[in-house]
Amino acid sequence: MQRVNAVLSGLGNIGSRFVGVLDRKREIIQSKYGLDVRLVAVADVGGAALDEDGLDLAHLAGLKGRSVAESVGKPGVSILQVLDAVKADIFFEATPVNLQTGEPGLSAIRAALRRRMHVVTPNKGPLALAYGELRDLARENGVQLRHSGAVFGGLPTVNIGQRDLVGATILRIEAQANLANSYILDKMGGGMVYREAVQAAQAQGCCAPDESLDVEGWDAVIKLVILANSVLGMDARIDDVAREGITHLTPDAVARVRAVGRVLKYVAMAEHQADGTYHLSVAPRELAPSHPLAALGPLSMGVVYTSDLYGTISAAITEEEPTPSASSLLRDMISIYS
């Protein structure tokens, strides 16, 4: 049995569910994979808790929005202080996305990598802003940086591209990458005006109170940048992606697409160019009914890879709540140690 000391930063929707998954799957993790995972430290916005023998996972999973500092932890302790204080093998970074600075996740990931900890994160901010730096830092320190949950939640999009298309030239990636836009376009196709469709998406829970990150295309841009860097080997930046949102669309425009037998989807795309580079774009696109993305429901995410060796491979997921995204941290951890 291999003991794995772990640190977690962030006890929100993803972090708290991940702790619950670790608790629920403890016996399988031990018996099937030979891993005795001990969560020796957890930090959130209120403080942190440390226990070299491992914290009580069931208790942490049940905090439900309350800070760990209110029960078993100490207030005011930062994740950087925690990383300085503990001896750990792997760091799970699950704080909210910050696209301006990547913080607090970016500094914490840097610190963990420098301390030779593997890092697993679904946090898009640090990856979109500093992927190349973090990848190189992991290599320099002989550890791994995994982030399958940062692109389409529980769908193993990155894994397919990195592992299963080995040796191929990827000619095109197409993805339904944003749940909010998919849901909004579906509702507009049924006659809702744009504002009503946004409110419906917010009520359903797939769109944030400030919808601009979704409807202006930024969320899809971020995911495409991460995919381009991790799968296509690019050094892409947010500004490299041609971006068109959906705020200008009307129910009549969506209906006209349907009337001619096509399907309007919000698609993130990477297209291979003659010079070996890729053109990156996110925009609403009219798809033929036979296209793999055309059949996806409004609460599904999907990706289609087209390559010179393996033809066209598509995969999709329906993720109606955060457990699949949270479970991607478990998937990445087991991949590191298996």
Image (spheres, rainbow, N blue to C red):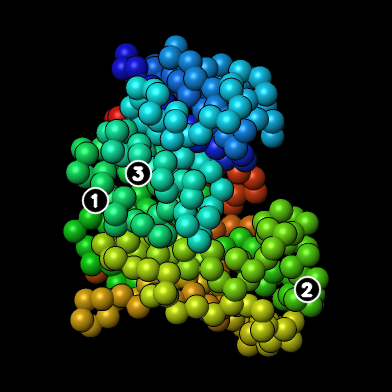
Q: Where is residue 256 shown, x and y percent of the image?
A: 68, 88
Q: Do the residues labelled 1 and 3 touch (CB within 8 Å)?
A: no
> SS class of the residue under badge 1?
helix
Q: Which of 125 and 169 is in front in this view?
A: 125
Q: Where is residue 257 shown, x and y percent of the image?
A: 64, 85
Q: Which residue in the protein does label 2 denote?
A: 195
Residue at the image point whose x is 27% and y is 80% from the top: 273
Residue 19 lies left or right of residue 173; in this view the side is right
Q: Where is residue 114 shown, x and y percent of the image?
A: 28, 38
Q: Where is residue 248 shown, x and y percent of the image?
A: 66, 84
Q: Which of marks 1 and 2 is in front?
A: 1
Say above or below: 185 vs 24: below
* Res. 329 in view: no
**First reached walking from the N terminus: tag 1 or tag 2:** 1
Q: Which of 71 and 315 is in front in this view?
A: 71
Residue 110 is marked as 3
